Amino acid sequence: MTGYSWLVFVHILAAITWVGGAILLNVLNTRSIRADDPARLATAAKETEWVGTRIIAPTTVVLLAMGITMVAVNEAWTIGQLWIILALVLFGLTFATGAFFLGPEAGRIARLVDERGVSDPEVRRRLRRVVLVGRVDLITLIVVVWDMVVKPGL
Amino acid sequence: MTLYDVLLFVHIMGVAVWVGGSIMLGVISSRIEGSGDAVFRARFARAAGVVGPVIGISAALILASGLWMVIDNDAIELSQLWVWLSLALFLLSGIVGAVYFAPASNRIIEALEQGRVEEADRRAGAFNLVSRLDTLLLVVIVGLMVFKPGA
């Protein structure tokens, strides 16, 4: 059991929490929209914001820190390798999407639901948009997992 | 891209859905329970019921891809400690999931919908405890996969 193994363990746990959590949120949010239940829709928006800022965001920081440390301590990895460049670019993209759009927008939607009710056309338009962006973000995350496994360019 | 890469990707995605989904569902469920609204809690528990089949499918994919990797890779044997112990813990978690979670969840929903909030709280407490232990078990399996004791 080496120090490097611990880095891999924490890195993988963080990735699992992020990707699995994002999939779960997508499933629950999609079901909420289909069910057309105002209470469920409002909860989905509020929980997405809470989980996004308090669980997923810190997890991504841990994930990045472990990843960079692994590159630093393992002579076989360098930042210039294609799979690492690709992972960092996609990570940056999905991190920015979550931090600057998905999380804050879910919070704005939750407040809008409280003010106008879930039947409001603006609320519905924003809910659909946030779920769509969430799906695209999820695909990006899955591509990052594929990149980590296949390591293109090695 | 080799067959082993594809199997490993499917295996890791399956684990992400199962373990990551369980962690996230546990967090959200705890928050919903804290709301104190019985009707709302029952609605959420019903909505969360969709997660069961999703986890079931991911468990099947994990098992199939894992066994295939053992067959495909000469360096991995079923007799290695990390492989058989992971398999045993995986089966234990799978059995707990199939035998306990769905019926226990239905009993909580039933109690909430019939206004038996105290009973629902008691059952939810037991449910959460088992759920946390199960998640811990899954994290141990991830540890076995990474550290590979006995390899």
Image (cartoon, rainbow, N blue to C red):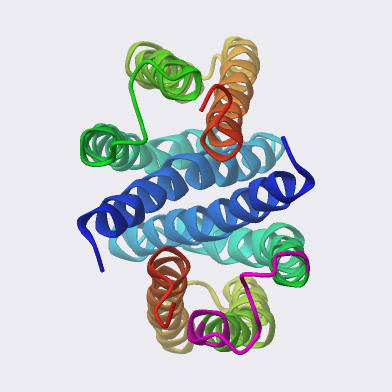
Vertical relation: A23 (above or below) B103? below
| Residue A59 in the image: above or below residue B142 | below
Q: Is residue B114 visible?
A: no
Nearest the viewer among B129 and B117 is B129
Q: Which residues are magenta?
A: A73-86
- Viewer-side residue, B115 vs A88: A88
Residue B130 drawn above or below residue A115: above
Q: Position of A22 compared to B87: left or right?
A: right
Q: Is residue A83 above or below residue B20?
A: below
The quarter of the picture where residue B93 lies is top left
Q: Is residue A78 magenta?
A: yes
For image coordinates 45% across by 53% down, the residue present is A24
Question: Left or right: B78 with respect to A14?
Answer: left
From the top left corner, tell me how far across and down residue A63 is, in percent: 69, 63
Q: Is A61 on the left-hand or right-hand side of B22?
A: right
Residue at 62 percent across and 70 percent down: it is: A76
Q: Is residue A109 among the parts visible in the rendering?
A: yes
Q: Position of residue A126 (x, y in %)?
A: 47, 85
Residue A125's spot in the image, x, y percent? 41, 87
Q: From the top left corner, tell me how far across and down residue B151 is, in percent.
A: 51, 28
Q: Quadrant of residue A113?
A: bottom right
